[in-house]
Amino acid sequence: MSTQGSIPGYEAGTWVIDSARSEVAFQVRMLGFMKTRGTFDAFEGTVVLADNPLDSSVNAVIQATSVNTKHKRRDQDIQHAGYLDTGTYPTITFASTGVRTEGDAFLVDGDLTALAVTKQSTLRLTVQGIETGADGKKTARFSATTEVSNKAIGVTKGSAFINDTSLVFLEIVATKQD
């Protein structure tokens, strides 16, 4: 899995995340059984695919104020101190520190920073495809998941009814830059 040849269409270069065709989503359990889902609707990032895929990197910035759970009051609450405190910490960032393989998946290790707390996080990433789009540009599609401890990043409110672990789901489309 660690060679270009095992990824059809693989091409080294800088790829920019297309936020209009990508999704950053999360899920948290409340009261142990109810699921609350949401997205962050404003984000950007760059993926640098190296000649050796294991030397690749990713950097992304999420605008924390773009949280969207389809419940306006909850979205406002999440932006306050004790949760994401977006007035003080308007962004959430991820900067990869290494790439490795496990079976058919790539594990992308990196620094996740939220609420001015940086924690090591690992994205379990699958390459969904790399192909030439209708516009003639190379497009890469990736899916990734990770888990984040709310307490570890500084979320202090809601622990009586919100589980500590948030699941994060990424569906990323990136376009190769010339």
Image (cartoon, helix red, strand yellow):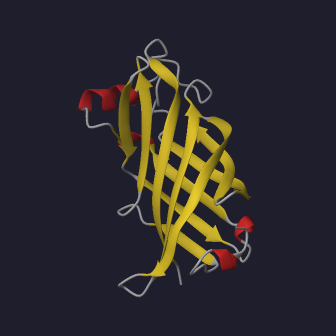
Mark count? 0
Quarter occupied by residue 15: bottom right
Looking at this view, name the residue that lies furthest to the top: 160
Give the vertical position of 76 relative to 52 (above or below). Answer: above
- Quadrant of image for the N terminus: bottom right
Residue 177 location (% of width, % of height): 52, 79
* 3 displayed left or right of 33: right
Instruction: Decide if residue 115 is in sight here.
Output: no
Residue 90 location (% of width, % of height): 47, 40
Residue 44 location (% of width, % of height): 47, 58
* 78 displayed left or right of 70: right
* 13 displayed left or right of 174: right
Quarter occupied by residue 77: top left
Q: Residue visible at 68% across and 49% down?
A: 110
Q: Residue visible at 47% across and 47% down?
A: 169
Front in this rendered view, residue 105 or 112: 105
Give the vertical position of 118 relative to 58 (above or below). Answer: above
* 41 displayed left or right of 4: left
